[in-house]
Image: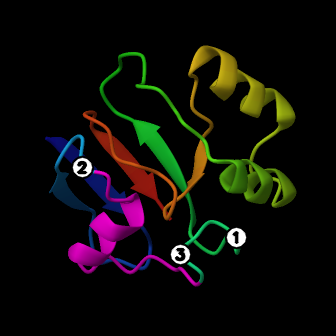
Amino acid sequence: MANVTFSSPRMQKDLTVYAVAGDTQSLLAVAQAHKIPLDFECQNGECGSCILQVTVLSGKRPYGVALTEKEKTVLRYSGKITPEQIEQAETNDIPPPYRLACQFIVRNEDILVKF
Protein backbone atom coordinates (compact mmCIF):
# COMPACT_ATOMS: atom_id res chain seq x y z
CA MET A 1 0.00 0.00 0.00
CA ALA A 2 1.07 3.55 -0.66
CA ASN A 3 -0.09 6.65 1.17
CA VAL A 4 -0.86 9.49 -1.22
CA THR A 5 -1.31 12.89 0.42
CA PHE A 6 -3.05 15.50 -1.72
CA SER A 7 -2.42 19.15 -0.84
CA SER A 8 -3.96 22.18 -2.48
CA PRO A 9 -5.31 25.61 -1.59
CA ARG A 10 -8.51 24.38 -3.28
CA MET A 11 -9.04 21.87 -0.45
CA GLN A 12 -9.95 22.71 3.16
CA LYS A 13 -7.16 20.45 4.43
CA ASP A 14 -4.67 17.91 3.13
CA LEU A 15 -6.12 14.47 2.48
CA THR A 16 -4.20 11.19 2.66
CA VAL A 17 -5.60 8.19 0.81
CA TYR A 18 -4.38 4.64 0.27
CA ALA A 19 -3.42 3.45 -3.18
CA VAL A 20 -2.79 -0.18 -3.97
CA ALA A 21 0.84 -0.59 -4.99
CA GLY A 22 1.21 -2.43 -8.27
CA ASP A 23 -2.23 -1.42 -9.46
CA THR A 24 -1.97 0.17 -12.88
CA GLN A 25 -4.33 3.04 -12.11
CA SER A 26 -3.00 6.50 -12.72
CA LEU A 27 -2.71 9.10 -9.99
CA LEU A 28 -5.64 10.85 -11.68
CA ALA A 29 -7.79 7.71 -11.25
CA VAL A 30 -6.83 7.52 -7.56
CA ALA A 31 -7.78 11.19 -7.13
CA GLN A 32 -11.10 10.71 -8.91
CA ALA A 33 -11.94 7.67 -6.78
CA HIS A 34 -11.49 9.83 -3.67
CA LYS A 35 -13.18 12.94 -5.12
CA ILE A 36 -9.98 15.02 -5.10
CA PRO A 37 -10.56 18.17 -7.22
CA LEU A 38 -7.69 17.73 -9.71
CA ASP A 39 -7.96 19.58 -12.99
CA PHE A 40 -7.92 17.44 -16.12
CA GLU A 41 -9.23 17.45 -19.67
CA CYS A 42 -7.94 14.87 -22.13
CA GLN A 43 -6.83 12.15 -19.65
CA ASN A 44 -4.24 10.82 -22.11
CA GLY A 45 -1.18 13.01 -21.56
CA GLU A 46 -1.58 15.55 -24.33
CA CYS A 47 -3.17 18.69 -22.83
CA GLY A 48 -1.10 19.17 -19.66
CA SER A 49 -4.03 20.34 -17.56
CA CYS A 50 -3.28 17.76 -14.84
CA ILE A 51 0.31 18.87 -14.10
CA LEU A 52 1.17 18.52 -10.43
CA GLN A 53 4.16 18.37 -8.14
CA VAL A 54 5.05 14.96 -6.66
CA THR A 55 7.43 14.51 -3.72
CA VAL A 56 8.48 11.10 -2.40
CA LEU A 57 8.17 11.13 1.40
CA SER A 58 10.07 7.97 2.32
CA GLY A 59 13.50 9.59 2.30
CA LYS A 60 14.71 6.60 0.28
CA ARG A 61 15.65 6.47 -3.37
CA PRO A 62 12.41 6.68 -5.40
CA TYR A 63 11.26 3.75 -7.49
CA GLY A 64 11.72 3.79 -11.27
CA VAL A 65 10.21 6.82 -12.89
CA ALA A 66 8.88 5.61 -16.25
CA LEU A 67 8.08 8.94 -17.90
CA THR A 68 5.95 8.46 -21.00
CA GLU A 69 6.93 10.20 -24.22
CA LYS A 70 3.76 12.32 -24.01
CA GLU A 71 4.60 13.30 -20.46
CA LYS A 72 8.17 14.30 -21.36
CA THR A 73 6.93 16.44 -24.23
CA VAL A 74 4.13 18.20 -22.34
CA LEU A 75 6.24 18.87 -19.24
CA ARG A 76 9.19 20.14 -21.29
CA TYR A 77 7.08 22.50 -23.41
CA SER A 78 5.24 23.80 -20.35
CA GLY A 79 8.60 24.66 -18.74
CA LYS A 80 8.09 22.31 -15.78
CA ILE A 81 11.10 20.09 -16.47
CA THR A 82 14.39 20.53 -18.25
CA PRO A 83 16.12 18.23 -20.74
CA GLU A 84 18.65 17.51 -17.98
CA GLN A 85 15.86 16.34 -15.63
CA ILE A 86 14.51 14.09 -18.37
CA GLU A 87 17.98 12.59 -18.84
CA GLN A 88 18.33 12.05 -15.07
CA ALA A 89 14.96 10.28 -15.03
CA GLU A 90 15.90 8.04 -17.93
CA THR A 91 19.44 7.15 -16.92
CA ASN A 92 19.43 7.34 -13.09
CA ASP A 93 15.74 6.92 -12.16
CA ILE A 94 15.71 10.32 -10.48
CA PRO A 95 12.16 11.63 -10.77
CA PRO A 96 11.45 15.17 -11.91
CA PRO A 97 9.44 17.34 -9.51
CA TYR A 98 6.46 17.65 -11.85
CA ARG A 99 4.35 14.91 -13.40
CA LEU A 100 1.06 14.49 -15.24
CA ALA A 101 -1.58 12.91 -13.00
CA CYS A 102 -3.01 10.97 -15.95
CA GLN A 103 0.38 9.36 -16.71
CA PHE A 104 1.85 8.83 -13.23
CA ILE A 105 1.38 5.30 -11.84
CA VAL A 106 1.50 5.10 -8.04
CA ARG A 107 4.29 2.85 -6.77
CA ASN A 108 4.83 1.31 -3.33
CA GLU A 109 6.01 4.57 -1.78
CA ASP A 110 4.38 7.39 0.14
CA ILE A 111 4.07 10.61 -1.85
CA LEU A 112 2.92 14.19 -1.41
CA VAL A 113 0.97 15.60 -4.36
CA LYS A 114 0.63 19.39 -4.63
CA PHE A 115 -1.64 20.98 -7.17
CA separation in Å, label 3 and label 2 = 18 Å
Disc 2 marks a residue whose amino acid type is Asp
Q: Mark number for residue 46?
A: 1
> x and y percent of residue 101 in the render?
49, 61
CA separation in Å, label 2 and label 1 = 23 Å
Q: Secondary structure at mark 3?
A: loop
Residue at 70 percent of width and 56 percent of height? 70
Disc 3 marks a residue whose amino acid type is Gln
Disc 1 marks a residue whose amino acid type is Glu
Circle 3 residue: 43
- Whether residue 110 is situated above or below residue 30 in the rendered picture: above
Residue at 34 percent of width and 46 percent of height? 106
> x and y percent of residue 17 in the render?
17, 58
> Counting other residues with Cα less than 10 Å from the Cα at mark 2, is it few (<14), some (14-19), or many (20 or more)?
few
Specify start and end residues of the magenta stretch as a single range: 24-41
Compare residues 71 and 115 and report the one nearer the observer: 71
> Counting other residues with Cα less than 10 Å from the Cα at mark 1, is it few (<14), some (14-19), or many (20 or more)?
some
Q: Secondary structure at mark 2?
A: loop
